[in-house]
Image (spheres, rainbow, N blue to C red):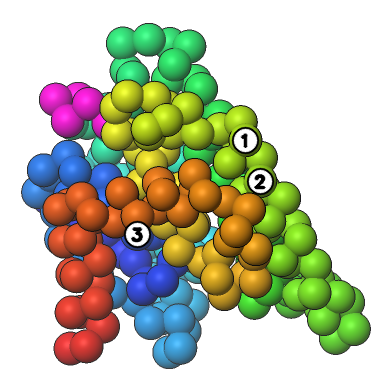
Amino acid sequence: MLKLYYAPHTCALATHIALEEAGAAYETVRMSFQSEDQKKVGYLAINPKARVPSLVTDKGVLTETPALLAFVAQTYPAARLAPLDDAYEFARAQAINSYLCSTVHVAHAHRMRGHRWVDDEAAIKAMQRKVPTSVGECFGLIERDMLAGPWVLGSAFSICDAYLFTLAQWLEADGVDLAKLPRVLDHRRRVGERPAVRKAIADETSQALC
């Protein structure tokens, strides 16, 4: 059985959603960043990057959200979570998820994780001040050019929708001007109404309360 290591309010939610959408048999392990579970010896043996998500499979451990999402889509093709029969369209999905991972998430991380890049407190504060603009510009591009409609890739829900929804959860905290993102907000609302998404969020919330 697949085992997903996650922490609440992180990008791991995207993989959690994909597993639910796929109807996969899986279990979850909740990590606490407050307790620095990701830095403990037991978890470092699973993922030496000390990050989430991590997905334990029968072949080994996978990390990095785009890879996990592609794995779920390819492992459960009947769920049709990616255009697996079209090399170009699948590459387009990968390009979108790579942008969400390498650019959008990194811009967001400057708000809380500035110490990853610099030690100077003034520089960290400057990075934090830039977040509403940098994240806003990322989502502005998504709003204009990357939402085919009604879903990210077009007519079918995909792994890209799970990932975009997850990062869009952080817009308010990042101080982004929501008035400029009506299509992104509509997408976030519609994804949030899906039963699999509600279940994934409820599972993470209920575990957090245990």
Q: Where does the image place residue 25, in percent across and percent down from the top left?
A: 9, 49
Q: Where does the image place residue 86, in percent across and percent down from the top left?
A: 38, 10
- Residue at numbered disc 3: 13
Which region is colored magenta? 77-81
Q: Where does the image place residue 16, in percent across and percent down from the top left?
A: 27, 55
Q: CA distance from mark 2 to mark 3?
A: 23 Å
Q: CA distance from mark 1 to mark 3?
A: 25 Å
The answer to whether residue 53 is seen in the rendering is: no
Report if the CB atoms under discs 1 and 3 are less than 8 Å apart: no
Report if the CB atoms under discs 1 and 2 are less than 8 Å apart: yes
Q: Nearer the viewer, residue 178 or 91?
A: 178
Q: Specify few, some or many for label 3: CA neighbours under 10 Å numbering under 14, 14-19, or 20 or more.
A: many
Query: Label for residue 61?
Result: none
Q: Quadrant of residue 134?
A: bottom right
Q: Nearer the viewer, residue 113 or 199?
A: 199
Q: Where does the image place residue 118, in percent across and percent down from the top left?
A: 83, 73
Q: Specify few, some or many for label 1: CA neighbours under 10 Å numbering under 14, 14-19, or 20 or more.
A: few
- The residue sitting at 40% across, 46% down in the picture is 187
Say which amino acid is labelled 1: Arg
- Residue at numbered disc 2: 140
- Residue at numbered disc 1: 144
Q: Nearer the viewer, residue 177 or 90?
A: 177
Q: Is residue 129 left or right of residue 139?
A: right
Q: CA distance from mark 1 to mark 2?
A: 6 Å
Q: Quadrant of the C terminus?
A: bottom left
Q: Specify few, some or many for label 2: CA neighbours under 10 Å numbering under 14, 14-19, or 20 or more.
A: some
- The residue sitting at 36% across, 46% down in the picture is 162
